[in-house]
Image: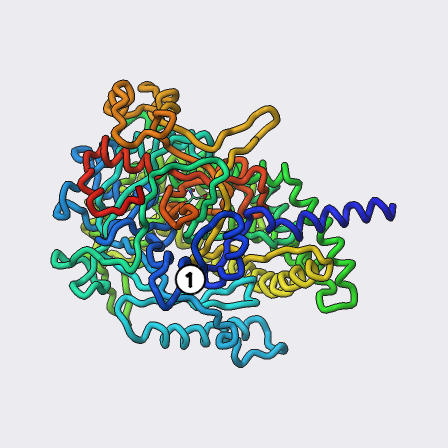
Amino acid sequence: MKNRFRIILATALAMACMTAKADEGMWLPSLISQRIVDMQEKGFKLSAEDIYSVNQASLKDAVVLFGRGCTGELISPEGLLLTNHHCGYSQIQQHSSVEHDYLKDGFWAMSRKEELPNKGLNVSFLERMEDVTDIILKGYTPEMTEEDRVELVKANSKALIAEATKEGKGLRATVEALYYGNQYFLFLYRQYDDVRLVGAPPSSIGKFGGDTDNWMWPRHTGDFSMFRIYADKDNNPAPYSKDNVPYKPKKYFRISTKGVQEGDFTFIYGFPGSTKEYIHSEGVRYIEEIGDPHKIHLRTLRLDIMNKYQAQSQKVRIQYSSKNANVSNAWKKWQGEVKGIKKMKTVRTKQEFEKAFDRWAQGGEFDGIIGKLAGIYAELEPYQFATDYYSETVRTIELANFAMSMARLFKQTDSTVTFDKERASEVAASFYKDWYLPIDKESFIAVMNEYEKNVPADFKPEYYKEKLASYGSIEAWAEDMFTNSIFIDPVRTEALDAADKDAVMADPATEFFNEFLKWYASDIQPVTTRLNQDLQLAYRDYMRGQMVYCRTQRVMKDFYPDANLTLRVAYGHIKGYSPADGVYYTPSSTIKGIMEKDNPEIFDYNIPQRLRDIYAAKDYGRWADASGEVPVCFIATNHTTGGNSGSPVINADGDLIGLNFDRVWEGTMSDIVFDPEICRNIALDVRYVLFTIDKIGEADYLFDEMTFTE
Ligand code: ARG
Ligand code: ASP
């Protein structure tokens, strides 16, 4: 018995304390000097100052947060930027119509004049980051309640942000908690708002393999698009103007075309969105057994409906292309994640770790923290479940969302009501452009029936129960909403004015959304907010506890803060993997694989005729590798997550060799637990980017502004 315990303890420790050895980790650039020796031992030839510096131009100045969820990098002194096709997707789509279908045919500006401006798109450069824990916690005393602490942090952050952004155009700042609030960092950004579309391959290249190949290896997707940042004549951020000029970056990447080999050092610089590497076993169990499976099922229903109608009409295919991709992306990822957590036995490993930790903690500062976390999770579970259902059902009804956004344009001051007609017109135009009633209505029926079946009565609004009773069925409810709502009719919507406020509020679509919203705000949110605050507080201790524990057990672990859409460095090397017994994947793919998948009958695999002709003639120009084929993608061991899309993949010399865009499906549990044997990021080989610009886009004039190392 004693022996068995010792073995379990040893395994648990090994699993939980030693993981950050092999390429796991998303490191803070300003602290990269702590990793630089390891990086250099693994092949990196530059210094910490080359990666991040506030005194001189460094690689960080060539990396941007693209929008609020992707990464991009500068590849010329003229503001030319590279990111993924799927990151520029909604911009490419917005410029597309049946007549100019840039999604289908691709788009290439043949001169600066032809570059397309994009409302609402911006990019942010990190000016600097700084540990501000002492400033943010100034005035904190251990007796404070968590609410008071939250308020204090808010107030101190606000003052700090105001100070940091006082001087300079386009500055914005955020204060982010790291390690559950054990540490705070200030991030100061300069944001540019005039970002124009320069080029995108046809989707048959940029989205080759579509959702079938998404999250998979071997991969052959040419997932890139190009933009250009514009600035005013002083190189400062400015809103779109035809007088703006190309932005001159402090730093841009040189491009290496000499090719990559298994074992080569790789380094990713980007904005990973969110990970939960240090959570309690109960948090993992919820994801694995409850959250993910239900969300997957609800999305399967919606995707089946979208796919059915998209297959019937080209117009609907375009209208729902972006929506479909968004819904299916997480849907597929969750499936890989569940599989990965199960395979890694993460719940059990964590439970064993927690047991050992708990024994160790007895009588000390961290005594009882494990039980406390379990208790909070137990209380949270039904509320989390209700929240997950609410967001994957009610909140997905497009008509209801639209109705609510129109309702919000009525403003009441004293007895006068106003309605912002101009804004309404804009919102309506973008809604109707991409809305197809039959999809929305069928989805309503499908997801609300699941809602009815699976959500316990205590966690449903009274409004809902009464309405359903009076309609008799979800189908009858849908019939009423999708026949009688004002908002199914663009003409009636356009005619709305201030006098229609009551009618809009009583509209079945508005009412549906609004009643659920009110219920959520009064019955669910206060509880989840309170419990999540309790969790934060408990995790703050547990996080510190894990650090102390691992140190005292003399098991080395280098901790890195969970991703939170701040700039990070991940490094590793190019490497294949074995996803299953008897299978081994090599780390790179070529154009040959595109031809093997090519199939004019299958939408996702129907490549442009031009690519077939090029392949037949082997007209590769200078882009073939030693084997005589054009390289397409490669995989590596860098620890990445959502948000790392579009990140530069950099070699030992600091030059650009690829563009990150995905992870392998079997490794998507890396947001929770990283397995060095299986977790791989997927990158586009930069030579395929150049090949496509050259041979498909015939936009090789763009090469003139790039710097090639060879
Ligand atoms: N899985 C990648 C990521 O999470 C690519 C997503 C876009 N592609 C798609 N077929 N939906 O961003
Ligand atoms: N495709 C993801 C992105 O958008 C990257 C990933 O999840 O690995 O950032």
**Mark 1 = which residue?**
49
Give the residue at x 51% y 59%: 525
Q: Where does residue 136 sit, x and y in percent of width and height?
A: 49, 74
Q: Quadrant of ligand 1?
A: top left
Residue at the image point whose x is 57% and y is 39% from the top: 338
Quadrant in the picture for the C terminus: top left
Residue 297 located left or right of residue 557: left
Which sits in the foreground, 537 or 639?
639
| Residue 234 as seen in the image, left or right of residue 388 | left
Tell me which amino acid carries mark 1: Glu
The reply to whether residue 477 is visible in this rendering is: no
Q: Which residue is most to the bottom?
A: 139
Residue 233 position (above or below residue 73): below
Q: Residue at x 38, y 47 (%)?
A: 648
Placement of 69 over or under 665, stated as above or below: below
Residue 56 drawn at (x, y percent) = 35, 65
* Residue 101 place in picture, x, y as percent: 21, 34
Left of 622 or right of it: where is 444? Answer: right
**SS at circle 1:** helix
